[in-house]
Image (tube, grey):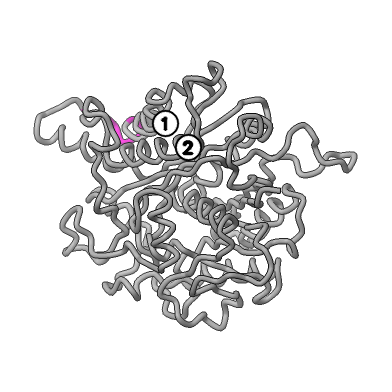
């Protein structure tokens, strides 16, 4: 499949499109295994605190994978009205909490916006498992009406976004993207397109959760979970000891806003979403090369920046030897061996499906704000065949952090990349 940029990088006459300034991020909301709330999570990340541990949501002792990045201290009644609790599941409650925080952080009162000026574009991929399991349990225990898996997932994703829209009166464009780990970036890219076409504000990103027996069966069927039981040695991307990843839950939602509208109301800006792109890998067995590097190059071109201007890369960090090697080769091919700092703070949360890349995007924006690169936890030695400058302790570079590249790969061949830049 041909690679494509989510916005036209160059017009046929060679001029870049000049219709709108790059949309800006004015709010961040986070629910993560190592911290609820943006600042709590970010402080834990900079301390290198991991939220990975033994599964407690259900009995995982009979399964080969026994670790997860669980959100253990979430109290849904503090974030979700009591009347909505029976209608929602864990993933939706996490998403509602993240949306509340993001809008409050942005200082936005949706009721004061013009009608249809704001909407919701999010990503999801695995959260429907918990909803589907609940439907099946009702069928088994009560003889309830059968609902197909497809119907359950489709309805669930729509409800997840719809609950955010209804709660905050966001009647503008809405949608859900399903591209697994790449989904968080793809949702932001779609929101960016909407804003460039005239929408004023969108809540976007991804929150996911599938830590239930049915979801766990799907994770195991993918063959990518580690069976290591030591949380400090389980998820080691770019290491010779890499054995797979740990599944987690949570993610981040962002308030993406038209730059002029944000400036007019005096909003605090974390940064701009300067470039986005996506590619799709060729079919397995076809002999074609992975397309992650193409996605990165297209995103940089879309942002109008060169590789030399990138100060840090937030890696997809699959935690599998072949996939890590392929990503390291893509990064080294673009920046040179060890040519740019690379980090993977998701080693403290596990891979969060659709929430993972959105959380990395939040980390990238906070890195630019605080001028610090967060660490990759637990990895002590980088494999010789992964020629990357992996950041394993918080690093404050000698030169200002201005530009970050975020990479993501979703199961099935999805590749996405986004470039964020510090406010001018």
Q: Nearer the viewer, residue 314 or 58?
A: 314
Packing grade of label 2 (10 A; few <14, some 14-19, many >=20) is many
**In the displayed structure, does residue 283 sit left or right of residue 56?**
right
Precedes in sequence: disc 1 or disc 2: 2
**In the displayed structure, does residue 352 sit left or right of residue 53?**
right
Residue 150 in magenta? yes
Q: Confirm or deny contact between disc 1 and disc 2 (CB under 8 A).
A: yes
Q: Position of residue 304 (x, y in %)?
A: 77, 50
The quadrant where residue 229 appears: bottom left
The correct choice, above or below, for 46 with respect to 354 in the image is below
Q: Residue furthest top?
A: 115
- Describe the element under mark 1 as helix, strand or loop: helix
- Describe the element under mark 2 as helix, strand or loop: strand
The quadrant where residue 145 appears: top left
Residue at horizontal 58%, vertical 68%?
Answer: 342
Q: Position of residue 247 (x, y in %)?
A: 35, 58
Q: Which residues are magenta?
A: 146-151
The correct choice, above or below, for 396 with respect to 99 in the image is below
Q: In whole angstroms, how far apart are the C-alphas of marks 1 and 2?
A: 7 Å
**In the displayed structure, does residue 380 sit left or right of residue 326?**
left
Q: Position of residue 111 (x, y in %)?
A: 47, 20
Q: Which residue is mark 1?
A: 161
């Amino acid at each position: 499949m041909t690679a494509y940029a989510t916005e036209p990088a160059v017009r046929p006459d060679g001029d870049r499109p000049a219709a709108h300034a790059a949309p800006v991020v004015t709010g961040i909301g986070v629910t993560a295994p190592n911290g609820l709330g943006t600042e709590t999570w970010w402080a834990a990340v900079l301390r290198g605190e991991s939220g990975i541990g033994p599964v407690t949501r259900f009995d995982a002792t009979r399964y080969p994978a026994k670790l997860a990045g669980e959100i253990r201290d979430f109290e849904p009644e503090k974030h979700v009205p009591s009347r909505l609790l029976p209608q929602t599941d864990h993933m939706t409650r996490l998403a509602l909490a993240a949306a509340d925080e993001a809008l409050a952080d942005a200082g936005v009162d949706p009721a004061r916006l013009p009608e249809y000026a704001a909407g919701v574009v999010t990503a999801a991929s695995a959260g429907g498992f918990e909803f589907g399991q609940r439907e099946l349990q009702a069928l088994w225990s009560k003889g309830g009406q059968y609902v197909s898996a497809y119907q359950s997932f489709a309805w669930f994703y729509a409800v997840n976004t719809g609950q955010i829209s209804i709660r905050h009166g966001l009647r503008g464009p809405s949608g859900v993207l399903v591209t697994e780990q790449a989904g968080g970036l793809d949702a932001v890219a779609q929101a960016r397109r909407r804003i460039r076409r005239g929408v004023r504000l969108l809540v976007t990103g991804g929150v996911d959760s599938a830590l239930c027996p049915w979801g766990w069966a799907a994770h195991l069927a993918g063959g990518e979970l580690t069976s290591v039981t030591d949380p400090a040695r389980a998820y080691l991307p770019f290491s010779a000891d890499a054995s797979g990843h740990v599944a987690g839950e949570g993610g981040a939602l962002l308030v993406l806003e038209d730059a002029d509208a944000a400036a007019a109301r005096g909003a605090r800006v974390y940064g701009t979403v300067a470039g986005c792109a996506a590619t799709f890998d060729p079919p397995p067995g076809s002999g074609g090369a992975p397309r992650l590097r193409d996605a990165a190059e297209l995103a940089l071109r879309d942002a109008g920046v060169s590789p030399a201007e990138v100060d840090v890369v937030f890696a997809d960090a699959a935690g599998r030897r072949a996939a890590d090697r392929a990503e390291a080769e893509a990064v080294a091919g673009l920046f040179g061996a060890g040519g740019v700092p690379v980090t993977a703070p998701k080693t403290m949360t596990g891979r969060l499906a659709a929430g993972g890349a959105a959380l990395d995007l939040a980390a990238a924006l906070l890195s630019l704000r605080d001028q610090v690169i967060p660490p990759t936890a637990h990895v002590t030695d980088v494999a010789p065949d992964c020629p990357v400058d992996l950041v394993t302790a918080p690093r404050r570079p000698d030169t200002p952090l201005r530009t970050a590249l975020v990479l993501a790969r979703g199961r099935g061949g999805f590749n996405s990349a986004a470039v964020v830049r510090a406010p001018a």
